[in-house]
Amino acid sequence: MKLQGNQRWLVAAVATAALTLGLAGGAWAQQPSDTTGGSTSDNTSAGNDNGGGMPQIQHQGDVAFVSGGVGSDESKALQGAERRWPLALRFTGPGSDFLADVHVQIVDAHGADVLQATSRGPYMLVKLRPGRYTVHARYKSDDQQKAVTIPATGSAKSAFYWNTQ
């Protein structure tokens, strides 16, 4: 009889210790770190702090941009965010196939490079100042260019299509 009482006490003590350690470990894991989200050298959207399936926002000089849309969550998130970004680009092929690895160069009205990046998916959103720009897009060895005007309010869209057959 006395042994069962000790066993119950031991089981209760072990369970309490495990619960305490589990809670403490969880609290420790949630402590803020010096690194939040990915970086411009991060080739994935893992670790991003944008939420809602958005890929990691990257910066090149004073231009912010985000690209992706390969998965349905990311695609929906980027499409939903288009109206909050001054420029939305889309890259497709035959049958509305989505394309990735499109090299994008944006040049301002004075011929200065504003952005050079490779899109990680069919959508690229770019924060640019109002003005006139030329977007150069290269998929494999096929180059295209389009003029875009970023309004003071609102946004601009430009779609690029390659016949990749």
Image (tube, rainbow, N blue to C red):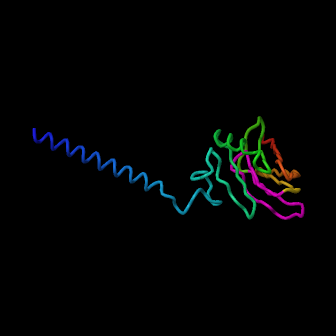
Asked which quadrant contains residue 72, the reply is top right
Which residue is located at x 14 percent, y 39 percent? 4
Image quadrant holding the C terminus, namely top right
Residue 5 belongs to the span the image colors magenta: no
Vertical order, 76 against 32 (above or below): above
Q: Is residue 122 left or right of residue 38?
A: right
Magenta range: 102-129
Give the side of residue 42 with respect to residue 84, left or right. left
Residue 132, image x and y in percent?
89, 56
Q: Nearer the viewer, residue 126 or 152?
A: 152
Q: Is residue 121 magenta?
A: yes
Q: In which quadrant of the rendered image does the N terminus lie?
A: top left
Residue 79 locus on image (x, y percent): 72, 42
Q: Pick the residue in front: 135 or 93.
A: 135
- Relative to 61, 4 lies left or right: left
Q: Which residue is drawn at 80% across and 43% down?
A: 162
Camera-nearest residue between 15 and 46: 15
Left or right placement of residue 11 versus residue 151 in this view: left
Residue 92 x, y percent position in the rendering: 77, 42
Magenta span: predominant SS is strand
Residue placed furthest toward the top: 95
Instruction: Tell me which corner region of the image, top left, top right, bottom left or bottom right, holds residue 133.
Output: bottom right
Residue 73 spot, x, y in % from top left: 63, 40
